[in-house]
Image: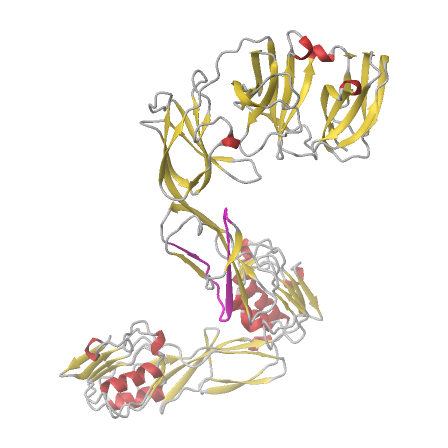
């Protein structure tokens, strides 16, 4: 019977929200929190400070041996009949919200009752009245021998009854009315009521309410005019019509905090704009402000707990809010348990998480709460999470979160071997992230030490691993497993801690030919507007030439063969490179820039020594763009001098026309072609033979950007004589 009586208390007093309880957990009665047993009967019960809420019920059976009861420091507002608790010797009911009518019978039954102090009693009343009305202030407290005294705004007034009437003739009636109540039946205890907040509708009330709003929204730290030192008619953000505030414009003022209930006292309010601030709370507007046509709170930090009660307010616009949560980024070891989430208020929320990583960007259908719990972080579950929240009670609003990134890392150890299979450490190791369709990114650089290269806490992903020696005396910069070309490198998929081996690629031998190739390498960031000449020199770019080696007899059409590495250099700090002593032959030129391929339609294959020319000097200009590496032949001097003397192209950049001037041209078969970087011929024109000639090429009708101006001898199979890079900028 005792346990049944205790469960009655549990159900009556909100047991599910008690701060300490195990009464419905299946535990034995002797182990129930707050319960003292003597010979299997309940003799003591301590439920103090346990969030008991409501009326302590009448116990009709059980607990008849309960001697000591403590329910202090809770939220009890009444106590039922305790007469069946016949063994009560002590009871503590202090620090609740009990009126004298509840306390008197308890004291009568248990004279040693502890009953004081009590928290404020009765419910708060807020009322807005018009001038000319009569309002009854009533704070009647239960009890048999009560006496009342009153204060208004903290100052004593001459009222002594439980209620009194106020004739409202002007704003002076406005104020907070509080009663203090004593009882001769319960000595030593004074009960204080919550206030009756009487608001008198008037311009004075509008002003007071706006000051309360100003304070609640931290107006002193905003760009709002100084309302506290100026009269209301000088507040630039407020419109007054017929001695009443009708419009408030506080958009983009740097406000924060909550819009309080004081807004409801501005009865003539028609429009209010609080948009684009940092407001986090909104009072319930429903059923108030009869003239309201527009109340804008877009662009703030409101969530559904603020808006559920207001969703039916037709004038309210809440359609967009700032991102929720806090942006974060963290790298943790692979396999780590990880939790992330966003606290979003509301009672009918629906959650949708999106994960963006190297694999995909997609909604994660298994995640349907405000929290993501990852038992073991992996390549598949790491990435950037974002949350979208909707509410069936607040139509038209989707809350979106800040980005929350969590990445997994692992340790990667690489051993580089020289030609004798001994560890090679005289250089730097590079972990280069593979990103399809983009320039690859060097994520980590380490120095060789011990037996190899250790990449610690490297973010999981697909990588090219490279080792660059300190000099080019013996080895080339080498990609895993053993190549100088990123396009031929093996991709390492880092998913867990790994170790592997790389074999260094050998530098080509000494060359002894008569030819030379030189040039420069620049990076074009692709900005065609305003910074058309914004290019940067690329230093330490790996430049190589591969020489064609035929498989069978030479001199045959379509002869088969392979291109073998012949020479390798790196560009200097000015982006310049030079190959010397090259033999006659056909070559393929390459620049190493991981992620950006060579443009096969540009000048990447050529023949040196063609036609028996001596001292051939080939000058190349290499431009690295987002789409590819473009190689242009600037001069092949022996060939070029057969055609032109003093050839000039200007202005560059050009707007309407490109001028071409030359002091001599002795061929009748030379054309100039303007070609875009995709290889499309934009325009073509025959060039006049003769001396001191000038030609204007119209570029006014083409898009701004980079173009190639190729000079072609049509009688020689369209072989290029020379090329210029032209910038068109309108």
535 over 252 or under it: above or below: above
Residue in the foreground of this view, choosing between 123 and 588: 588
Left or right relative to 214: residue 681: right
Residue in the foreground of this view, choosing between 708 and 586: 586
Q: Is residue 356 magenta?
A: yes
- Quadrant occupied by the N terminus: bottom left
Count of all numbered marks drawn on residues in the image: 0
Q: Which residues are magenta?
A: 338-359
Residue in the foreground of this view, choosing between 346 and 372: 372
683 over 351 or under it: above or below: above
**Residue 94 coordinates in the image, percent (x, y):** 30, 78
- Quadrant occupied by the C terminus: top right
- Point 77% across, 23% down: residue: 651
**Residue 17 coordinates in the image, percent (x, y):** 36, 74
168 over 726 or under it: above or below: below
Q: Quadrant of residue 141?
A: bottom left
312 over 700 or under it: above or below: below
Residue 185 seen in the current view: no
Q: How is the image coloured?
A: secondary structure
- Point 55% across, 29% down: residue: 593
Q: Residue furthest left?
A: 39
Left or right relative to 499: residue 722: right
**Residue 479 coordinates in the image, percent (x, y):** 46, 29
**Residue 233 coordinates in the image, percent (x, y):** 67, 62
Q: Residue furthest front?
A: 553
Q: Is residue 722 magenta?
A: no
Residue in the foreground of this view, choosing between 565 and 354: 565
Q: Quadrant of residue 69?
A: bottom left
Residue 601 seen in the current view: yes
């Amino acid at each position: 019977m005792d346990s049944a009586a205790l469960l009655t208390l549990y159900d009556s007093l909100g047991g599910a929200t008690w701060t300490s309880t195990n009464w419905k957990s299946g535990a034995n009665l002797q182990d129930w929190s707050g319960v003292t047993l003597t010979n299997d009967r309940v003799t003591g019960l301590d439920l103090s400070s346990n969030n008991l809420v409501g009326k302590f019920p009448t116990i009709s059976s059980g607990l008849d041996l309960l001697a000591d009861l403590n329910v202090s420091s809770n939220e009890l507002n009444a106590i039922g009949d305790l007469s069946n608790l016949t063994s009560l010797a002590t009871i503590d009911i202090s620090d609740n919200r009990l009126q004298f009518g509840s306390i008197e019978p308890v004291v009568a039954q248990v004279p040693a009752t502890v009953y004081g102090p009590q928290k404020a009693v009765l419910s708060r009343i807020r009322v807005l009245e018009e001038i000319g009305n009569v309002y009854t202030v009533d704070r009647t407290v239960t009890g048999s021998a009560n006496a009342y005294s009153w204060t208004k705004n903290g100052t004593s007034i001459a009222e002594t009854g439980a209620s009194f009437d106020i004739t409202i003739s002007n704003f002076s009636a406005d104020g907070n009315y509080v009663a203090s109540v004593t009882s001769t039946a319960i000595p030593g205890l004074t009960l204080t009521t919550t206030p009756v907040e009487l608001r008198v509708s008037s311009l004075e009330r509008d002003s007071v309410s706006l000051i309360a709003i100003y304070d609640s929204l931290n107006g002193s730290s905003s760009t709002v005019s100084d309302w506290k030192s100026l009269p209301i008619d000088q507040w630039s953000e407020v419109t007054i019509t017929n001695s009443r505030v009708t419009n408030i414009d506080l958009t983009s003022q740097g406000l924060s905090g909550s819009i309080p209930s004081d807004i409801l006292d501005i009865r003539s309010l028609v429009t209010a704009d609080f948009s684009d601030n940092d407001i986090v709370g909104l009072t319930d507007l429903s059923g108030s402000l009869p003239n309201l046509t527009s109340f804008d709170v877009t662009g703030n930090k409101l969530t559904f707990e603020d808006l559920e009660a207001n969703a039916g307010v037709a004038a309210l616009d809440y359609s967009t809010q700032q991102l929720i949560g806090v942006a974060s980024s963290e790298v943790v070891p692979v396999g780590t348990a990880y939790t992330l989430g966003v606290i979003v208020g509301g009672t009918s929320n629906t959650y949708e998480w999106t994960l963006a990583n190297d694999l995909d960007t997609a909604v994660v259908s298994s995640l349907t709460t405000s929290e993501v719990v990852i038992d073991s972080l992996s390549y598949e579950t790491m990435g950037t999470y974002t949350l979208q929240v909707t509410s069936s009670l607040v139509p038209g609003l989707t809350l979106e979160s800040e980005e929350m990134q969590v990445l997994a890392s692992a340790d990667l150890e690489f051993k580089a071997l020289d030609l004798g299979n001994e560890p090679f450490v005289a250089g730097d190791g590079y972990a280069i992230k593979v990103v399809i369709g983009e320039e690859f990114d060097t994520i980590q650089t380490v120095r060789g030490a011990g037996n190899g290269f250790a990449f610690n806490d490297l973010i999981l992903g697909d990588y090219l691993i490279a080792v660059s020696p300190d000099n080019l005396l013996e080895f080339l910069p080498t990609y895993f497993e053993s190549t100088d070309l990123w396009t031929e490198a093996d991709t390492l998929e880092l998913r867990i801690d790994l170790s592997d081996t790389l074999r260094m690629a050998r530098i080509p031998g000494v060359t002894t030919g008569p030819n030379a190739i030189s040039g420069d390498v620049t990076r074009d960031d692709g900005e065609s507007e305003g910074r058309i000449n914004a290019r940067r020199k690329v230093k330490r770019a790996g430049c190589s030439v591969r020489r064609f080696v035929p498989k069978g007899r030479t001199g045959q059409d379509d002869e088969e063969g392979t291109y073998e590495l012949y020479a390798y250099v790196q560009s200097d700090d000015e982006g310049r490179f030079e190959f010397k002593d090259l033999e006659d032959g056909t070559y393929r030129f390459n620049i190493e820039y991981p992620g950006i391929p060579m443009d096969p339609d540009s000048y990447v294959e050529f023949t040196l020594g063609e036609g028996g020319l001596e001292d051939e000097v080939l000058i190349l200009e290499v431009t690295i763009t987002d789409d590819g590496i473009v190689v242009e032949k600037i001069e092949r001097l022996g060939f070029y001098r057969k055609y032109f003397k003093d050839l000039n192209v200007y202005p560059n950049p050009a707007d309407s026309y490109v001028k071409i001037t030359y002091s001599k041209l002795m061929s009748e078969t030379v054309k100039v072609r303007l070609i875009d970087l995709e290889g499309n011929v934009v325009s073509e024109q025959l060039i006049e033979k003769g001396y001191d000639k000038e030609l204007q090429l119209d570029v006014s009708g083409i898009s701004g950007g980079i173009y190639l101006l190729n000079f072609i001898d049509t009688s020689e199979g369209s072989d290029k004589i020379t090329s210029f890079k032209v910038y068109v900028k309108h």
